[in-house]
Image (spheres, rainbow, N blue to C red):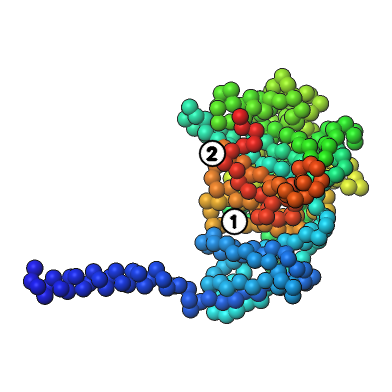
Amino acid sequence: MTIMKRLIYILSIVLAAVSCADIRHVNPYEEGMHVLTVVSDLNITSAEVRVEDMNTGSRYVSQTGADGTATFTLPNGLYRVTLSGRDGSDVFNASADKVVISGRDHTLALTLSISKAGSIVIKELYCGGCKKLPQEGDYQADQYIILHNNDYQVQYLDGICFGTLSPYNSTGANPWISEDGLLPEFIPLIQAVWQFPGDGDDFPLQPGEDAVICLRGAIDHSAQYPLSVNLNREGYFVCYNSTYFPNTVYHPAPGDRISTDRYLEVVIKTGKANAYTLSTSSPTLVLFRAEGVDIHEFVNDTDNVINVPGSSVDQVVKIPSEWVVDAVEVFDGRSANNTKRLLPSLDAGYVLQTDTFLGRSLMRKTDEAMSASAGYEVLADTNNSLNDFYESERQSLYE
């Protein structure tokens, strides 16, 4: 190599290094940075506002100031915005999907929905399954939920119902969204509605007390699969009906410690599956209590059971949103293509499940200050799962 070529080669390396250093310190979106101002119709202060880039997953968090607004400086992009606040038992929420920031500053006006913090809340949702280690494969017959009395008074599980929303997954097309981008005012529950037994006061839940519901097998799963859990425990409830769901792989006969009076009832089955289906990656679970009508009479009314748009087979039960006691929406953390299924008044956000079959569980946070004041465990409840839930590395029932 000649001296001249060597100098040119060295100079090119230096210039390349300088260029790389410059790129690292230059914001590629500098020309596209704009101010997003978030306002609400009620101008509440100290409300948490979250902004998420729907393409990259980047998140930004702020609070509304004395003027009731929050501002963000953002690059051009497509965003999801949620606002949550609480005043005593009143919960304020709003959300907006697909907010476009492009070429100019933008003001987003949100209409707040007002609801009450729940007395009975979903404390934990374990849906993702685990590995069959030391064997090969994945396992999902051990799904469960835990409910919690978040109130200072005794609450009763008797008559409470629950189910999962259509569509099953957050990444699928949502046939319920209107041409205007609006969700329906009712809750489309698919496949089945389950109900707690009891005559009104048979199953009390003391303040701070939990109730475990086995969504599938109420057996000791950990005896065969050590990364799973033992669901054969005294006091546990179970979704078990061998007539409607005869698949014994997912619904084996409950263990010897499960009392038959704790079998949940199938109010209605609208699907054809032989096992109750709950998404492992991104379900939406709704807890509700029928008001002003017996739930059996309600589902027997043909106006309340309708077909999924575009399907001649799949049906849902139209549950009034006013009946909802608590709800949680899960997004699939492996996808950037998640779509909301719940109204902001029920869950303004979502909790991310980053992967499946790893034994991870979705848990509600503890409100340490309120727990210390109340003298029992009080859980966070802003009706926004972004604030209220987190993904745990392990099921709470794992031993």
Residue lying farthest to the bottom in this orientation: 104
Q: Residue at x 60, y 51 (%)?
A: 352
Q: Residue at x 60, y 79 (%)?
A: 105
- Label 2, secondary structure: give it: loop
- Residue 22 position within the rendered picture, expressed as x and y whole percent measured from the top left: 36, 72
- Residue 156 position within the rendered picture, expressed as x and y whole percent measured from the top left: 86, 38
Q: Is residue 202 left or right of residue 316?
A: right
Nearer the observer, 122 or 197: 122
Residue count near mark 1 (Cα–Cα under 10 Å), binned few <14, some 14–19, many ≥20: some
- Residue 284 position within the rendered picture, expressed as x and y whole percent measured from the top left: 68, 48
Quarter of the image where one finds residue 102: bottom right
Q: Is residue 396 left or right of residue 58?
A: right
Q: Residue at x 64, y 24 (%)?
A: 220
Residue lying farthest to the front in this orientation: 372
- Type of amino acid under label 1: Asn
Q: Which mark is residue 4?
A: none
- Label 1, secondary structure: give it: loop
Quarter of the image where one finds residue 206: top right
Q: Looking at the image, can residue 72 be seen?
A: yes
From the viewer's perspective, is the residue at label 2 or at label 1 nearer?
2
Give the distance between the C-alpha atoms of the residues marked 2 and 1, in whole angstroms: 21 Å
Residue at the spot of label 1 = 338
- What is the quadrant of the C terminus in the image? top right
Nearer the observer, 101 or 244: 101
- Residue 226 position within the rendered picture, expressed as x and y whole percent measured from the top left: 55, 27
In the picture shown, does residue 105 fall above or below 354?
Answer: below
Q: Which mark is residue 358?
A: 2
